[in-house]
Each structure stands twice: as C-alpha cells, then as structure tokens.
Amino acid sequence: MERTAPRIVMKFGGTSVADLDRIRAVAKRVQAQVDAGCEVAVVVSAMAGVTNRLVGYCDALSPLHDPREYDAVVAAGEQITSGLLAIALQSLGIRSRSWLGWQIPVRTDDAHGKARICSIDGDGLIACMRSGQVPVIAGFQGVDNEERIATLGRGGSDTSAVAVASAVKADRCDIYTDVDGIYTTDPRIVAKARKLDKITYEEMLELASVGAKVLQTRSVELAMKERVRVQVLSSFSDNAPAPDGRLPGSLVVDEDEILEQELVTGIAYSRDEARISMRRIPDRPGIAAAIFGPLADANINVDMIVQSSGEDGMTNMTFTTGKADLQRAIALAEAAREVTQYGELITDDSVVKISVVGVGMRSHAGVASTMFRILSDRGINIQVISTSEIKVSVLIAADYAELAIRALHTAYGLDAA
Ligand code: ADP
Ligand code: ASP
Ligand code: MG
C-alpha cells in the first residue's frame, strides 16, 4: 500500500517526561501531530533522575556488579515511561500501546551497559501505526542474542529514536529536549551561546564525541550512515517559526546544505576525564606498547596522549582516560611497573577537556594558536593537547572550565548578537 501520510518519530528525553504533568503535555504534542495527519512513533527516556537512581542502587550493592543485571535494573526506567505515556494518550482518545525493546525486537550485541544495536524489526511498529495506533517505544533498551536485556549507554534513547526512524523509514526523527536546539556551546554554561539552525552530521558527531550531550554520539553516527533527518526541538516551547522566518530547533544535515561555513562551529567540554602522568620512564622502544597494551586489553579507552622529548635517556608520558576507569588504569600501570620502570605515577581527576570543532579548520590554519593565546592570556595552563582534522582539544584544570569556554566562545566570534 502506498504511504501518503508523513511518518515521524518523536523522542522525548528525561526532563520532558519528568512528571505526570510533563507526560500529559507530551501526549498533547503527539496528539497535534496525529491530528495533522502524521503517522507517529514515539520513543521515551526514563523520567528525569530515575536512571541515575537505578545506577546508584547497583553501585551501592556492588561496585563490580554483573553488567547483565545492571541492564535488567536500569532498563526499568524507560518501561515505566512508555506505559505511562500510552495511558496518557489513551486518555486523550488516541489509540496507543507501549513497546519494550524485546517486544519489537531491538537486537543488540552483548556489550552490556553500552550495547550496540545490531538490527531492529520495523514490521510490528509499522503495522501498529498503519492500524491507527501510536506505538510508544521504551528507549535505551534492547535484547541480546541470549534474550537478555541490554542497554545502550547513557543518553542511549537518542540512538533508539534514530534506529527506529531508520527501521520504519520515517521522514524525520524529532528529538525533543530541554533546550530549543543545538547551540554553539552548552547554553547552560554560556548565556550568549547561539542556536544553530543547521549543523553537519560530521560536526555534530565530533561535538557529541567530545562531550556535547544534546545528542548521543552513536545516534549521530547512525543518522549519518542511514541518512535519517534529525531535528532537535524544545519540548517546553511551541516551536513556532520566529517572526524573522528562522526555523525552530536545529537540523542535522549534509555539508552541502550549509551555505556559509564558519571556521569554528562549536565548543564542547567533558568533565569525564582523568589524567595519568608517568614520570621518568626509560626512553626506548616498547615502552608505549607496555603501557597501553594492558589498558586496551582491559577495554579502557585512552584519549589524549603526550610524550615529552627525552633527556638523559628518560622521558615522561601523560594520557587521559574516563573518570570511571581511573582506578583500574592505575592498577594496570602499577602491575606493569617492572617493564615500564617509571619513576613516579601522578593522577588528577580535577580536569576538563575543552574542544573546538569546525569543518572550516580543514582549510584554515590558526584555530589552535588562537585557542592557546586566549588561554594563556587568562593564565590558564594547558596540560595536554590533541588535534584531529576538524577539532582541537586541550586538557585544563576543572576550575577554569567556564572561564575558558566563555573566553573561547567570544574569541571565535560565536557569541549571539
Ligand atoms: P534529554 O534528557 O532530553 O536527552 P540531555 O540532558 O541528554 O537531554 O541533553 C540536553 C542538554 O545538553 C541540555 O540541557 C544542555 O545543557 C546540554 N548541551 C551540551 N552541549 C549542548 C549544545 N551544544 N547545544 C545544546 N545543548 C547542549
Ligand atoms: N535514561 C537513559 C539515561 O539517562 C537514556 C536516555 O535518557 O537517553 O542515560
Ligand atoms: Mg540525552
């Protein structure tokens, strides 16, 4: 049967479904799209704070808990919201039902706690929409090959939404959240942050991967691969077009859809960093492999790395990991001391990584040097630097995060008029 009605996926994050009033408001928003003639599938997160509470329960019982049981616990938040929103929709006279990950099914790998979606069967959801119902899908969850519940990593409902949009061949995936779009930086840190009407997949991917949590990194990766049109909107405003004709929200698009490319598109930060420095290690082949091999074997991601130039046959190595991995990384470094023979191990988790991102960097020099100058003018010491084709990142003391982000935002001409 030919499809004429537009088909959209609407995703609502934790603050958008934080209490029953918010859930009623979400139901009305869905109703407006149904009344406008759209076929709608909804993806929901857990109510704000619920996932954190569930994670806390697991940690409190055992810091080294079984990740499969962690998933059974933390997936519960989304189950509750999907049922509640289906009830709220039914109260408005809209036919609706909840769908849990295993009922669709959303198949994942077995990397519990940060599982990847392998496939989604869209047939049941499409049949549901075709029959005039609104499916309300529990985000963040799926089921592995052994029929165990798996979750997709923090912020994973964004990825559920994009994956569902791809599986049901939706025309659009609308991500409703507590800000009205994607900004040049976190608008909660910089009041002068500017909303971007459009941003490229590539830049959004880079911003997400260095800490801009407005979209989960994998959701952007998937949208780019599956060509899903993603729009970020506020669930707190009416998203009417502005009087000057500007669009509500932000669209994630291909590079050729952006007319004027700025040098720097945005600035992101991540507080989830810890620094490890090994002082006075022998400057000879094989040392880096002896340090980083065991970390890789233990699935510990190492992000930034610097090795200082050697002197007297000795050198220093500094690198960063996620805060949650710091204790394990220290234990592994100490275990390998016989080989690496470092003199001293220093760690610091009061650090923040600040990154500037823009595809314009491919063709223009000077972004990094501006960053270093601005930080130096403010007396902020740079501990580690890393760069990629469209990004420069620095590690600095956490106390200076806001000062640095605001100064850089102004320096790159990103402040709203
Ligand atoms: P949700 O619960 O809806 O998934 P999140 O808290 O995961 O919401 O993501 C939205 C938050 O992302 C915003 O409240 C904002 O503080 C933060 N954020 C960080 N960087 C940006 C950015 N560049 N643009 C917009 N929001 C950002
Ligand atoms: N509820 C999950 C979390 O808090 C998933 C999400 O909100 O996207 O991480
Ligand atoms: Mg989120």
Image (cartoon, grey):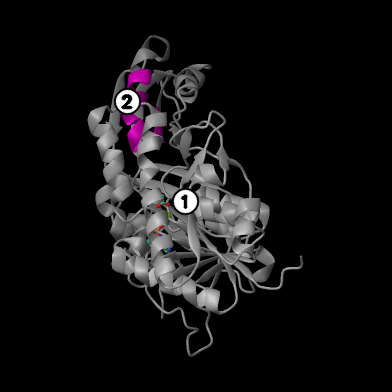
Residue 3 image position (x, y, % from top left): 72, 68
The local crowd at label 2, few if under 14, some if 14 to 19, many if 20 or more residues have their Cα within 10 Å, is few
**Residue extending furthest toward the right:** 1
Up the image or down, 273 lies above or below 416; here it is above
Residue 139 image label: 1
Q: Is residue 38 left or right of residue 136?
A: right
Give the magenta-colored segment's residue range.
317-333
Q: Marks 2/1: CA distance?
A: 25 Å
Name the quadrant of the C terminus: bottom left
Residue 64 image label: 2
Residue 412 image position (x, y, % from top left): 45, 67
Up the image or down, 30 lies above or below 128; here it is below
Residue 46 image label: none
Q: Amino acid at mark 1?
A: Gly
Q: Secondary structure at mark 2?
A: loop
Residue 195 appears in view: no
